[in-house]
Image (spheres, rainbow, N blue to C red):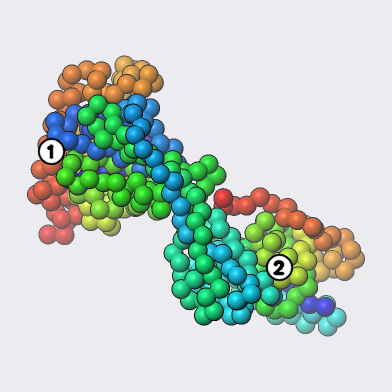
Amino acid sequence: MIVAVASGKGGTGKTTVATSLAASSASAVQLLDCDVEEPNVHIFLRPEIRGSECVTIPVPDVEMEKCNLCRECAEICAYHAIAVLGDQVLTFQELCHGCGGCSLVCPTDAIREIPREIGTVEWGTAGGIDFVHGRLRIGEAMSPPLIRAVKKRIERSRLVIIDAPPGTSCPVIESIRGADFVLLVTEPTPFGLNDLVLAVQTVRELQIPFSVVVNRAGLGDEEVYHYCRDQGIPIDLEIPFDRRIAEAYSRGELLVEMMAEWRVAFQTLLRSIEERAIRGRALHHEVSR
Amino acid sequence: MKIGITSKGRDLDSPVDERFGRAAGFIIVELESMEYEWVDNSQTLSAPQGAGIQAAQNIAQRGVTHVITGHCGPKAFRTLAAGQIKVVVGATGTVREAIEQFRQGKLAVVTGPDKESHWA
């Protein structure tokens, strides 16, 4: 089973939930940090890194002797990474998504693909947890291919937990695509609610069963609860707004290591997720009935 | 001499659009006769990325020697330069006023972009 932990809003507690979920699993577990722009799972797990690989995307390199300036490459590129002006072909490699369309349509075979480094994937172990994360090259904007490289290392025989990036755009879609279940972590504030609504719309579009974790419960107002009730969205766990939890976080400690009762709570959460995923008791199913 | 001015509207009395790649459109004007045409840029305007590159390619096909706009970023500048098009920034007011300022030499051709990239 693949469980993705996502949120919409940043800083709601995705990593707190993802790491504690992984550490509570009685069976073999793999934890993937797909927030490749700012990975932080390793700060909590302190894994022993056993391997790494450089991740590249193919970008065009034009041989002008072969080019007939037909503009086919510039016209097929949705991202304007290749342009033809006068007798010149310009490439903007940082805009290239690496689809290979330009070299495919080139009638004179003037475009070859060369690799451009976007980041690295590292893997290792922390206690019983198999760990994988990606580190995007600084200044790089093209994170989805790196997220795909992280997810290539998924071993489906295990419980797989994905710590997704915040937001609802391409990196999030790439991270949660293919998951059997999504946990949406929010906080009971107007900001938390606004971004939860966006995240719910995203997950429904992808038709993945999901439930909500409310972090910093006791803070803010009741609107997140009203929204979840009105929409029939189950709240599977509440983590209180508690100074001790914030202090443990600031020391890089796992919630489940802080107090034994949290291990029980996360084991219960895991069982609940498994049941929901299996039964498909997701809201979108209930709504579509 | 034919030049292109980024414009928020379809005629010479429209305000100059200070953006290049994401301008509403371009007024292409023949300076001697002041005959002009409007080139809509709305499709490029909504591009997720590379609007400056696309707009520069479009305007290069119109045979202009200069582009007058508010600001120009590095990718648009590089693309315009490849098309042998000179870039004039800092234009304000209406398109007609910008043309007049350009004629009087009050707007200078720049040798590089005056804005940082929006993207990487």
Which residue, given by chain and number where applicable, does mark 1 sit on?
A272
Quadrant of residue B66 in the image?
A: bottom right
Where residue A204 appears, x then y in whole percent?
25, 54
Q: Residues within 10 Å of mark 2 (few under 14, many from 20)?
A: many
Relative vertical location of residue B70 with respect to residue A21 in this rendering, above or below:
below
Residue at the spot 45% in from the left edge and 66% down from the top edge? A100
Say whether residue A287 is left or right of residue A203.
Answer: left
In the picture, measured across the screen, residue A275 lies left or right of residue A161, that is left
Mark 1: few, some, or many residues within 10 Å (few <14, many ≥20)?
some
**Which numbered marker is on residue A163?**
none
Residue B82's label in the rendered image is 2
Subunit of label 1 = A
| Residue at image coords 49%, 56% | A115
**Residue occupying the far right of the picture:** B104
Which sits in the foreground, A19 or A184? Answer: A19
**Residue A113 point in image, percent of width and height:** 50, 64
Camera-side mark, 2 or 1:
2
Q: Are marks 2 and 1 on the same chain?
A: no
Alpha-carbon distance for marks 2 and 1? Answer: 60 Å
Q: Residue A65: which quarter of the image?
A: bottom right
Q: Secondary structure at mark 2?
A: helix
Image quadrant occupied by the N terminus of chain A = top left
Query: Of the residues shown, which amino acid type is indicated by label 2?
Result: Ala
Q: Give percent across and percent down for residue A142.
A: 47, 52
Residue at left 49%, top 71%? A103
Q: Is residue A90 above or below residue A189?
A: below
Camera sees residue A7: no
Q: Nearer the viewer, residue A246 or B61?
A: B61
Q: Amino acid at mark 1?
A: Ser
Q: Is residue B110 above or below residue A156?
A: below
The chain that hosts pointer 2 is B
Percent position of residue A276, x then y: 13, 45
